[in-house]
Image (tube, rainbow, N blue to C red):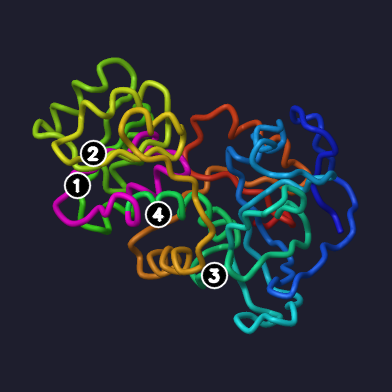
Amino acid sequence: MKAVSFRRFGGPEVLEYCELPEPVLGPDHVLVRMRAAGVNPIDWKAREGLLAPMLDTVFPVVTGFDAAGVVEKTGPAVTEYAPGDEVMGFVWPDILGRGTFAELFAAPVRTLAPKPDRLSWAEAAALPLSGIAAYQSLVHRMGVGSGDTVLVHAAAGGVGAFAVQIAAALGARVIGTASEGNHDFLRSLGAEPVAYRGALAERVRALAPDGLDAVLDAAGKRALRVSPELLATGGRLVSVADPQVKALGGEYVFARPAADDLAELGRMVEDGRMRVEIAQTFPLEKAAEAQELIRAGHTRGKLVVTADRTG
């Protein structure tokens, strides 16, 4: 099968578009023919060795953690899926070795959910990791609900765009930070936009003088540092970008595969409460280009690689 892999840590030059054996199928796994795979910052971090302290690595490493595709085979203990089923998943491994940037990938059923009919392959592949990170932060960690005022940092990015829509669907008032060129986009998602450069704290206070009930940070750095002072009494702070949030009295969320959460995100798309914004798609062999684009930042929505040129 064709795959994108690396045999040593490094920059985009270590990525190879190559032929690799079909992955081994575990008892509770399904073998999926990939149609599209989402691109996330964690892809280049894995490539550069930044995940080595938390995951054992077996080379060659096939990159990629998000995907959508069609089930080809099932392990002997699998009852949830059958060949021909269309699925999407956040396939987080116990060992860094076989990811989703391949024509075939093996995934435990706990990481998968049915693909919503109304989503294209690219949209379904873009949803899992970023959508789960936003959902678990807002729902499980901060308990956002009707009447809350929520600030989302980096609101036009992958996690941020989902977070805006999820918070709005929960009945919250949403303020989102982004560059001025993305303000109309944020309004279309249901957020009141705020420029993140310059007097950020003052702009937010002008919109929410009584303070914020919750802040979801997907940016880190300065945006995170000014966030505690913007909270109302009892306000909650979560970052998906920077573990240093704990030193500021908040919580760090690292998305966890969860079939139920992913299925709920699928329902939100199906009934129109949320949409998936695709910034650009790339053929599988151009994965290095996609990783470098997301590494540079400032992407609106999601990047996706596809196993064919149709997306």
Q: Which residue corresponds to the image point at 68% horizontal and 44% vertical from the top-left?
A: 55
Circles 2 and 1, Cβ within 8 Å, touching? The answer is yes
- Camera-nearest label, 3 or 4: 4
Real-space Cα distance between discs 2 and 1?
A: 8 Å
What stretch of residues is rendered in magenta?
Answer: 139-164
- Camera-nearest label, 2 or 4: 4
Q: Quadrant of residue 184?
A: top left
Circles 3 and 4, Cβ within 8 Å, touching? The answer is no
> Which residue is disc 2 drawn over?
192
Task: Find residue 132 and report its horizontal and vertical position in percent.
Answer: 46, 55
- How crowded pointer 2 is (Cα within 10 Å; few <14, some 14-19, many 20+) is rated as some
Count of numbered circles on the image:
4
Q: Quadrant of residue 209?
A: top left
Task: Find residue 171 and report its horizontal and vertical position in percent.
Answer: 20, 56
Residue type, numbered disc 2: Glu
Real-space Cα distance between discs 3 and 2?
A: 32 Å
- How crowded pointer 3 is (Cα within 10 Å; few <14, some 14-19, many 20+) is rated as many
Of residues 69 and 141, the one nearer the viewer is 141
Of residues 262 and 187, the one nearer the viewer is 262
Q: Which mark is residue 136?
A: 4
Is residue 197 shown above or below 14? above
Callout 1: helix, strand or loop? strand
Q: Quadrant of residue 40?
A: top right
Task: Find residue 233 and report its horizontal and vertical position in percent.
Answer: 13, 37
